[in-house]
Amino acid sequence: MVVLHLLCGCCCSTQLALQVDHKSYALIFGFNTFLALLLQTILTLVVADERGLALPIPTQVGKIKMQLVLQFYLMPIMCVLTWI
């Protein structure tokens, strides 16, 4: 299942790279990585910090599992829709 997720991410990145000027690769993929890190930091602060939701660890793990399941089902659908 994880391999399918990584394969779809690779396919989506390839499709994006095919449609973007080669001079813009660093800007686009660097911004994508920065945005992902920023969102991960914000989510960690909201979910785990005492000033945020302060969810207990079992609840956090359950939410992460649910998010991963949604990603594994939605990512292939999104990849297929971009190829159409």
Image (cartoon, rainbow, N blue to C red):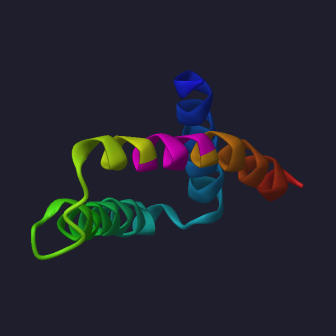
| Residue ranking furthest to the right | 84
- Is 66 in the magenta? yes
Classify 29 as above or below 58.
below
Of the 4 image quadrants, the one containing the C terminus is bottom right
Of the 4 image quadrants, the one containing the N terminus is top right
Q: Is residue 20 visible?
A: yes
Q: Which residue appears at 43% of the width and 50% of the height?
A: 63
Whole-percent x and y of residue 33? 32, 59
Q: Which residues are magenta?
A: 63-69
Whole-percent x and y of residue 59? 35, 48
**Between 80 and 45, the one nearer to me in the picture:** 45
Left or right of 57? Residue 6 is: right
**Between 20 and 76, the one nearer to me in the picture:** 76
Tell me where residue 7 sits by quadrant: top right
- Is 67 in the magenta? yes
Q: Which residue appears at 18% of the width and 67% of the height?
A: 45
Left or right of 81? Residue 38 is: left
Q: Which residue appears at 43% of the width and 69% of the height?
A: 24
Whole-percent x and y of residue 61? 35, 41
Q: Which residue appears at 63% of the width and 41% of the height?
A: 11
Whole-percent x and y of residue 35? 33, 69
**Between 15 and 71, the one nearer to me in the picture:** 71
| Residue ranking furthest to the bottom | 51
Name the magenta segment's main secondary structure.
Answer: helix
